[in-house]
Structure formats: C-alpha cells, structure tokens
Image: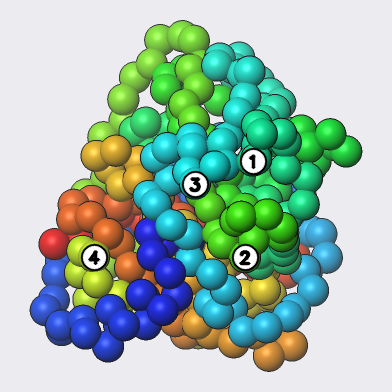
Amino acid sequence: MFASSRSTVRRRAVAAAGTAVALALTLAACGSSGDSSSMPGMDHDTKASASSSRSASPSMGDMPGMDHMADGNGLSDTQDGYRLASKDTTLPSGKRAAYRFTVTGTGDKPVTGFALDQTKRMHFYAIRSDLTGFQHIHPTMAPDGTWTADLTALAPGSWRTFAGFTPDSGTGKGRDFVLSRTVTVPGNATKTPLPAPATTAEVDGYTVTVKGEPMAGMAHPLGVSVSKDGKPVTGLEPYLNTYAHLTAFHEGNQEFAHLHPTTKVTGGNGGPDLAFHAELPTAGNWRLFLQFRTGGTLHTAALTLHVG
C-alpha cells in the first residue's frame, strides 16, 4: 500500500538510480494471537517471547505484490469521497479495548462491500506516536458496516489508527485506500527514543538480515533473509498470501507505507531469502515491522531504517 499505483511503482523501479543509502535495523519484538499482531511491550528495546498464534495458514492465491497500491500517505481520514469515521476519541490504558469504526462513501453511508487484499477485507493498524506498540489486526464487520478491532493493552499517549481497504463497488472499486484517525490514551505518556541503527536483528531466536538500497520516493528491491543458530531458515509458513508481511511508519509524522512482497508463495514453506518491492516516499527514519510465521507462531520484528 504505497502512495502510488502499481504502474507508477513499476515505472519508478525502472528509473530508479542505484545510489546507496544508510540502511539500518534494530529490533524489538513480541508475539500475537489469532489474526492480529501486537507489541504489548511499549519500549523499543523490549524482546518478548514468541507468540501463541497457531491458527491455520490463510489460503493462497495469486502471486503477492501484484495487488493494487494505495493512493495517499495514510495521514488523512478522508479521500475521494471515502471517510474513516469513529466515535472513539479516547481508549483506556493498560487493558484490552474495542475500537469501532466505519468507512463511509456516497451520501455518507457506511460501505459494506470490500474486496480481498492479501486474504483479508480490512487491515487495521495501531501505532503510538513514538512508533512503539505496533498492532496489526483483521477486524470483524457487522451487517451495518461497523468494524470492531480488538486491541491489546495500550500505553498512555497519542495513537494513530489506520484502516486499509479496497471497495468492491462504487466510485472507488478496485482502488486501495489507507485512511487514519488519532486517538488518545489518557495517562502519563513517556516518549521512547527510536533505537540506533543496525544491519541485523533478532526475534525469538531468529536472525533477520536486510539488504537493499532504498531511496526516498523511488522503488527499489529490498531483500530479507532469515536464519536461526547460524543456519538458513527454510520453514517460513504462508501468512497473508506471502512468507513475510512488512509495514513501515515514518518517524516524523507516522506516514504509512506497505512494502509489498514479490516472493511467490509456491504452496509449501519458504525462506531463507525474501524479496520486497520497497518504496518509501519520504527521507528520514522509518520504523519497519516484519511479520513471519514458523511452526504456527507469528513473529514480529521491529526495525529502524534510514532512507536518504
């Protein structure tokens, strides 16, 4: 879900220069359950154990990375007649909370028809202003178009919630949108500084290595490899029609980018090497969240990337 169309990404990929930038990663990880991924530890340097997610792998379809790219940077609640609406302006601190929202369209009526994107009709993200507390959830929709995202415990502070969707009818049919709103969690909020750069990261005993030369506003390949105990991992299980899911948020304004995988899911396990189509529209530091599954467990690694 970049701020461009697929055709734009392809054109930029051809035109992209090979100028290198400083690539850096550092890790904070935690587990998740069910179809969500969250980081209940609010500190960037938290290293939590593997998650308890052991649900069945999603069905596989077309090659990942071939779906639509979202317009915009995800920082608005309205775009081209669609609006992300919610009565929730505050959420409780330190306990599970349900965030309810709707997507409205023509005549300000709730939209109820959504197309599948990476096996889901809605991708919901929550991120704290200091880029801690990441949660990736696939909410449920009631017949009236009201979505409910069940969030794990939130730390005090300002949060931004993102809804990623593709209408299957109307003026936006076939287009991917990412809209967002802010919500406040009352309490004593302490900002956690972004970690220092590094080229590898560890999560739940796995080592993640990233290679690539991303440039601001240009499409570039980004490679990720996964190993454990010094040996390549070839047991990555399909997750959301891919072997790893990668989401990024800009340090300055929480701008959103979805780095689409280009490694084809072949029907079995994958790894150790994965390829992504990376386009980060703004220079500066980005916080990347890499999700991959092994043995039915979903792992989430947090990575800091500097883009020149």
| Amino acid bearing label 3 | Asp
Q: Amino acid at mark 2?
A: Gly
Kind of element beneath mark 4: loop
* Eye-nearest disc, 2 or 4: 2
* Residue indicated by mark 4: 217
Q: Residues within 10 Å of mark 1 (few under 14, many from 20)?
A: many
Q: Nearer the viewer, residue 288 or 144?
A: 144
- Dot label at residue 96: none
N-terminal of the pair, mark 3 or mark 2, is: 3
CB atoms of marks 2 and 4 within 8 Å: no
Pointer 2 residue? 174
Q: Check disc 1 and give the amino acid type.
A: Gly
Q: Residue at x 27, y 88 (%)?
A: 14
Query: Are discs 3 and 2 less than 8 Å apart at CB?
Result: no
The reply to whether the C-beta atoms of the residues labelled 1 and 4 are less than 8 Å apart is no
> As displayed, is residue 62 above or below residue 128?
below
For this view, does 71 lie left or right of residue 114? left
Quarter residue 200 falls in: bottom left
Residue 305, x across and y down, in percent: 27, 58
Q: Residues within 10 Å of mark 3 (few under 14, many from 20)?
A: few
The extreme top residue here reads 187
Q: CA distance from mark 1 to mark 3?
A: 9 Å
Q: Residues within 10 Å of mark 4 (few under 14, many from 20)?
A: some
**Label pair 2/1, CB-CB below 8 angstroms:** no
User: In the picture provided, is 203 more to the left or to the right than 165?
Assistant: left
Q: Which residue is mark 3?
A: 80
The residues tagged by marks 2 and 1 sit, at their Cα atoms, a distance apart of: 14 Å
Q: Give the image location of residue 38, x and y in percent.
A: 59, 43
**Which residue corresponds to mark 1?**
105
Q: Residues within 10 Å of mark 2 (few under 14, many from 20)?
A: some
Instruction: Write down the quadrant of residue 98 in the picture.
Output: top right
